[in-house]
Image (cartoon, rainbow, N blue to C red):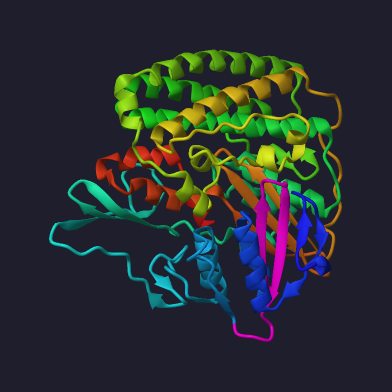
Amino acid sequence: MSQLNIHNTQHFKLDNIVFLKNADFRRTVSEDLQAGKRMIALCPVDRNDRSKIIAVFADSSTSMITVTGCDFANGPYELESFADKFPQTNFFECELAESHGFSLLNHPWQRPVRKQTVINGSTPYKFFGITGDEIHEVAVGPIHAGVIEPGHFRFQCHGELVYNLEINLGYQHRGIEELIIKANAIRRIILNESIAGDTVMGHMSAHCNAIESLCNITPGLRAQIIRSIGEEIERIAMHIGCLSGIANDVGFALAANSYGRIRTIMINSLGLICGSRFGRGLFNYGGVKFDIDEITMKTLLANMRSVKSDIAQINALMFSSVGALSRFENTGNVSFSDASSTGLVGIAARSCDIKTDTRVNFPYGAYRYSHLSMMTMLTGDVFARAKIRSLEIDESFRYVIEQLENLPEGSISVDHGDLAAGKAVISMTEGFRGEIVHIAITDKSGNLMQYKIKDPSFNNWYGLSLALRNTAISDFPLCNKSFDLSYAGHDL
């Protein structure tokens, strides 16, 4: 077989990957894309050696992950682009070119990923432009008012109508992947907690699952459930924060302030468990550092039930407001076709009726035993993205309360050994924004030689560009908040 098929978090030997010649690789990858598989990674096996790369695909219909290799040792470092026919591969290819010097043949639109103004090493990048007597350009950022992260947004407009939005990022590129490879175990955990400050639980779950798989250990059920409780509390808190921002952007102060009040209760609940309101320090290799005792349990359950009741009333207020709905509906639309072809994930995808949720399609940890319902909408607009958040909050409350009321006895941590040599693992989780992917690969001595991260924002920033087409530029803040993407998660 020319491909390796594995499950989420299943480690495998590097020797099991078949590295094809370029032409065979292109044919095999094209067949996978044509079959509806979704690219989740395109990177070298060794971060410091580009001679062998892997393309990794997720197949939601079978819950399988496919790995296909390509050997460039005896040929030019050129890759025939798939992006013209399969736009979802666009940014993966651009990243491969930018980070590892590959030439992309027949690529429709090679753009910077994290270097802002250059492509192909040092070639100045020319921004997309539209000419015409009545066309004007609006440039926003990278420095913004307040505390927003840096990003550059370039609008091509006719009057108030946006024809095209080009988003340039990379201002927060910290080189986290390389730092993780060089770090010891303690520093690796700290670095993974810092990938995106609002997604500590999501990224730590992916990271710990990957390292534990390479160490051939499995945390106990109590630890797995505590982890999932942390993930769902993070999801609730961040969704509430986003709904507050959406309400604020349409001037609905009562709803915005009410959401803000109860978000504080939720992040304080994470602090009750581990001392950090964003969950830092909860995860360790082999389980969790903090247990949930009876007193904490009672407080958590009281918080969950109180906020669940409050948010039901706030949601009813917001989603029955004629003024709010007139701003939400048919604003920032993304079609099913566009969302599917460009590979959107998480809320951005599910709002367009794309049925993708790692907890359901590629279950991991406690989600293998206790299931959640997947929420989807049809319209792909601000309303759909906001409404799904409210539905997911309800489902997460159900899950957290159920797990707290039935938390099993057992150890919260098991010992871990060294990383296995010459092995790899693909670890997928579902952060509150969507699919997170961590890939860890070890050399013959058992040291990390590749650590690849994909935050959902890597997929979804282009979705925001699509949402702004034929939309009034004054609706940009509302559309932007409805996607609620991470600059740091993209920039790494």
| Residue placed most toward the observer, 136 or 342 | 342
Q: In this view, does 451 lie to the left or right of 314?
A: right
Q: Residue at x 50, y 33 (%)?
A: 377
**58 part of magenta stretch:** yes
Instruction: Tell me if 129 is positioned left or right of 434 in this view.
Output: left
Where residue 471 appears, as percent x and y from the top left, is 29, 44
**Residue 444 at what x, y percent from top left?**
83, 70
Please say if 375 is above or below 206: above
**Is residue 433 placed above or below 372 in the rendered structure?**
below
Q: Which of 7 and 183 is in front in this view?
A: 7
Which quadrant of the figure has residue 175? bottom right
Residue 231 lies in the magenta stretch: no
- In the picture provided, is 331 more to the left or to the right than 354? left
Comparing 72 with 176, the one in front is 72
**Residue 420 is drawn in which quadrant?**
bottom right
| Percent x, y of residue 24 | 68, 75
In front: 138, or 188?
138
Q: What span is colored magenta in the figure?
A: 50-76
Is residue 46 visible in the rendered image? The answer is no
Q: Residue at x 26, y 43 (%)?
A: 472
Q: Is there any visible trace of residue 320 in the rendered image? A: yes
Quadrant hosting residue 29: bottom right
On the image, the x and y values in percent for residue 92 come to 55, 63
Quadrant for the N terminus in the image: bottom right
User: Looking at the magenta stretch, what is its main secondary structure?
Assistant: strand
Q: Residue at x 44, y 53 (%)?
A: 462
Which residue appears farthest toward the left when viewing the image?
A: 133
Count every numbered label the image shows and give the total.
Answer: 0
Quarter holding the C terminus is bottom right
